[in-house]
């Protein structure tokens, strides 16, 4: 009788679930879109709207922020906080909200490859937030 050995290999891939932060805002007001992670000299942060529209970029080294190639929808409406970068806080403030600002914003942090999603729901003042809020 032949001895048979079966080698069973498991490859375990750990994928951290992306936790979506829900943020409610009102037309004409402001909303903070939160994003936190560890920081290094090589840290770059890319904010995107609905996966592709360029909202804001925080460049590597020195906490330089840039609105280059920023979509016109967000021009002159983003406030950033460079004094917070050393603490790993890459949140931005979006002002003069419109209903068109509602949707998913994503904060991509490189090189740590962290992805943070923010679901912004903008309603008229006094209106109830959307379902599930």
Image (cartoon, helix red, strand yellow):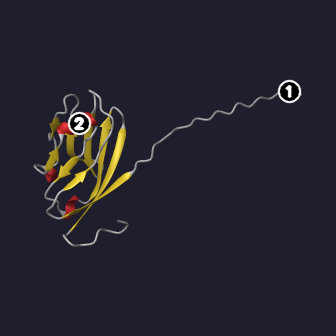
Q: Which label belongs to residue 48?
A: none
Mark 1 / mark 2, whichever is N-terminal: 1
State the SS at label 1. loop
Q: Which residue lies furthest to the bottom in this view?
A: 127
Q: Residue furthest left?
A: 76
Residue positioned 30% across, 32% down in the render: 39
Q: Which label belongs to residue 2?
A: 1
Q: Where is residue 94 in the image (x, y as percent from the top left)?
A: 18, 53
State the SS at label 2. helix
Residue positioned 12% across, 49% down in the render: 75
Q: In which quarter of the image is residue 129?
A: bottom left
- Give the camera-side residue of 117 and 73: 117
Left or right, 103 with respect to 114, comes to left
- Give the camera-side residue of 82 and 100: 82
Q: Where is residue 69 in the image (x, y as percent from the top left)?
A: 16, 41
Q: Do the residues labelled 1 and 2 touch (CB within 8 Å)?
A: no
The quarter in which the N terminus is drawn is top right
Q: Where is residue 41 in the image (x, y as percent from the top left)?
A: 26, 27
Left or right, 18 with respect to 55, comes to right
Q: In which quarter of the image is residue 100?
A: bottom left
Q: Position of residue 54 (x, y in %)?
A: 21, 46
How far apart are the alpha carbons under marks 1 and 2? 64 Å
Q: Which label belongs to residue 85?
A: 2
Left or right, 114 with respect to 8, comes to left
* In the image, residue 39 above or below residue 17: above
Residue positioned 29% across, 45% down in the render: 35
Numbered-mark total = 2
Mark 2 closeness class: few <14, some 14–19, many ≥20 residues within 10 Å: many
* In the image, residue 79 above or below residue 127: above
């Amino acid at each position: 009788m032949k001895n048979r050995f079966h080698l069973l290999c498991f490859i375990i891939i750990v994928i951290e679930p992306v936790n979506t932060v829900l943020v409610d805002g009102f037309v004409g007001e402001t909303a903070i879109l939160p994003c936190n992670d560890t920081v290094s000299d090589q840290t770059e942060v890319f904010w995107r709207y609905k996966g592709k529209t360029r909202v804001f970029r925080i460049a590597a080294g020195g906490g330089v922020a840039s609105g280059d190639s920023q979509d016109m929808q967000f021009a002159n409406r983003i406030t950033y906080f460079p004094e917070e970068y050393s603490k790993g806080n890459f949140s931005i403030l979006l002002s003069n909200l419109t209903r068109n600002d509602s949707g998913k914003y994503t904060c991509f942090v490189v090189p740590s490859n962290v992805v943070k999603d923010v679901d912004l729901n903008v309603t008229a003042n006094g209106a109830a937030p959307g379902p599930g809020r």
